[in-house]
Amino acid sequence: MLLLFATYGLRAGEVLHLRLDDIDWKEERIRIRHTKTHSETFVPVVTPVGAAIIAYLKNGRPKTESRDVFVGAQAPYQPFRHGGAAQGIIHRRLKQAGITVTGHQGAHAFRYARARSLLGASVPRSVIGNLFGHRSVRSTTVYLKLVTDDLRSIGLDLPSEITKCPPGPTKKKRSWSSS
């Protein structure tokens, strides 16, 4: 679950509602049903994610009739119904790893981190928007604020003394005369 968040920057509901039929092993792709926009995209199954899903299906997933990939670990083995379940899982795993998160929490922390890494790698906003299931490039611009700290590192220092311009108009008005 955590690899899906970190690799693709998915929302909690997109991972929790992933169905076995959404994974096309032959074509090596995963159908993502975007919960916010109700659109669908396909992402490639990268090797670490595919291996983790297979390991979970073989060794971690309880036996159940549910077609959802992820189900609760305690009986009755039901699919997760809301994103809060992901929040709890993420919180427990990060705590076990000794990681303290500041700022965005849960699946959104992974989403923002993925956006930052893609922006840092000069991936076009339209590509990031497609991965994130955004309908417009404007929706992706919210992630541009993430690079502000990076831009500060190359900013120029302001002089300690500022010289003011003399008061008055900055442009001379032209008068046109008709001849």
Image (cartoon, rainbow, N blue to C red):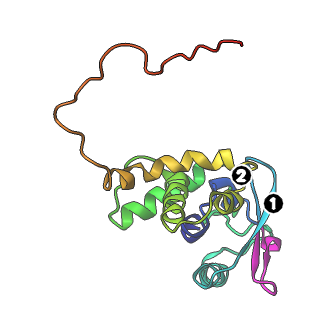
Q: In the figure, is residue 142 to the left or right of 38? A: left
89 or 173: which is nearer to us? Answer: 173
* Distance of label 1 from label 2 (alpha carbons): 10 Å
Magenta range: 19-31
> Looking at this rendering, what residue extends furthest in the front direction?
179
Q: In the figure, is residue 103 to the left or right of 178? A: left
Residue on which the image places disc 2: 134
Q: Residue at x 61, y 66 (%)?
A: 8
Q: In the figure, is residue 131 to the left or right of 167? A: right
Q: Along the polypeptide, which appears first: circle 1 or circle 2?
A: 1
Quarter residue 79 falls in: bottom right
Q: Residue at x 16, y 35 (%)?
A: 160
Position in image of residue 84 (x %, y %): 58, 48
Marker disc for residue 61: none
- Tag 2: amino acid: His
29 within the magenta span? yes
23 or 166: which is nearer to us? Answer: 166
25 within the magenta span? yes
Q: Classify 10 Å Cα crowding around label 1: few (below 14), some (14-19), many (20 and above).
A: few
Residue 175 visible at all: yes
Quarter residue 93 falls in: bottom left
Position in image of residue 125 (x %, y %): 63, 57
- Tag 1: amino acid: Glu
Q: Residue at x 71, y 51 (%)?
A: 134
In the image, residue 159 sits, relative to residue 31, either above or below, namely above
Secondary structure found at label 1: strand
Residue 101 visible at all: no
In the image, residue 106 sits, relative to residue 71, either above or below, namely above
Marker disc for residue 40: 1
